[in-house]
């Protein structure tokens, strides 16, 4: 059953890509809101392997990012987590994510969910033109960023922009808070707070990188 309780002949699947270092409530609200507005049957969270825009930065070990994403999404029957990007060698490009999910789910309509800041990068993505044919793109508002896909040359029909409840949360700020010993409760799910503390993530200031 879909977010609105319907049955669809063709499955409607959201894809939420991200570094998730760590996953936070902004990601979860974005996925939940798009699932509702588009009446999706599922949202697949896809933690990146090596993110193309974060090369040279200190990104947390992929298994930790994957497990935090699993913990954060476990209670929602419509949410799941895919390892396609983590298991694919090399740098992560969204076109490869889309092709892998398409191959796994050939009969589904795909909706790629992205925040305002990531949408601004969209035209720099490898094979951008091929992406529009595989998935519909849904840009969600994010505090601090202006969304104007046309300005970046994204074709009109390929992307929608929807307004979602504003959560001024970023992984960068969660990491900074952790390094400084400030609380991250209620910015990330409880299980993620506990995972960060149990594994000592974001605790060594010398590893801090943005
Ligand atoms: P970082 O600060 O490390 O870049 P982030 O908070 O931006 O982390 P990402 O993993 O880079 O998180 O983002 C994954 C996707 O989620 C991107 O499309 C991003 O735009 C979107 N996103 C992240 N935070 C929010 C938020 N608070 N509201 C809406 N969308 C968000
Ligand atoms: Mg980001």
Image (cartoon, rainbow, N blue to C red):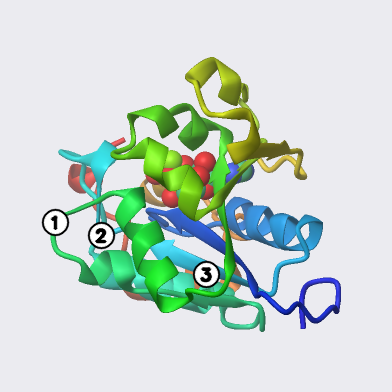
Residue 84: x, y in percent? 32, 70
Task: Answer with left or right where residue 43 lies relative to residue 60.
Answer: right
Secondary structure at badge 3 equals strand
The label shown at residue 67 is none
Q: Give the labeled residue for mark 3.
A: 44
In terms of depth relative to the viewer, which is nearer, 171 or 111? 111
Q: Is residue 54 left or right of residue 130?
A: left
Can you give x and y, in whole percent of width and height, for residue 63 in the image? Answer: 27, 73
Asked if the residue at label 1 sits under 8 Å from ligand 1, the reply is no
Q: Is residue 73 visible?
A: yes
- Residue under the point 25% across and 42% down: 52
Q: Above or below — where is 40 with respect to 150?
A: below
The N terminus sits in image quarter: bottom right
Query: At 55% from the left edge and 57% from the top edge, which residue is drawn?
Result: 24
Which residue is painted at 74% across and 56% down in the image?
A: 33
Seen as rendered, the residue at the extreme right is 5
Q: Residues at badges 1 and 2 in contact (C-beta under 8 Å)?
A: yes
Query: Reading the chain from its start, which is encountered first: label 3 or label 2?
Result: 3
Contact (Cβ within 8 Å) of mark 1 with mark 3: no
Label 1 crowding class (10 Å Cα cut-off): few <14, some 14-19, many 20+? few
| Distance (Cα) linking label 3 and label 2 | 15 Å
Give residue 37's quadrant in the image. Answer: bottom right
User: Which residue is disc 1 drawn over?
Assistant: 90
Q: Is residue 177 visible?
A: no
Instruction: Identify the mark nearer the N-term, 1 or 3.
Output: 3
Q: Decide which of 174, 30 is in the foreground and name it.
A: 30
Q: CA distance from mark 1 to mark 3?
A: 21 Å
Q: Position of residue 89 (x, y in %)?
A: 14, 63
Q: Which mark is residue 49?
A: 2
């Amino acid at each position: 059953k879909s977010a609105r309780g319907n049955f669809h002949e063709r499955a409607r699947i959201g894809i939420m890509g991200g570094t998730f270092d760590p996953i936070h409530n902004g990601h979860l609200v974005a996925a939940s809101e798009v699932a509702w507005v588009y009446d999706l049957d599922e949202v697949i969270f896809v933690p990146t392997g090596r993110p193309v825009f974060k090369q040279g930065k200190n990104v947390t070990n992929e298994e930790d990012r994957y497990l935090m994403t699993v913990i954060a999404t476990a209670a929602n029957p419509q949410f799941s987590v895919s390892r396609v990007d983590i298991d694919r060698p090399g740098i992560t490009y969204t076109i490869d994510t889309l092709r892998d999910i398409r191959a796994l789910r050939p009969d589904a309509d795909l909706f790629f969910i992205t925040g305002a800041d990531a949408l601004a990068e969209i035209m720099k993505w490898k094979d951008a033109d091929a992406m529009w044919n595989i998935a519909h793109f849904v840009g969600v508002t994010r505090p601090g960023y202006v969304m104007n896909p046309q300005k970046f040359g994204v074709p009109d029909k390929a992307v929608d922009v929807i307004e979602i409840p504003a959560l001024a949360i970023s992984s960068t700020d969660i990491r900074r808070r952790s390094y400084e010993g400030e609380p991250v409760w209620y910015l990330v799910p409880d299980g993620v707070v506990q995972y960060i503390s149990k594994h000592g993530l974001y605790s060594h200031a010398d590893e801090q990188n943005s």
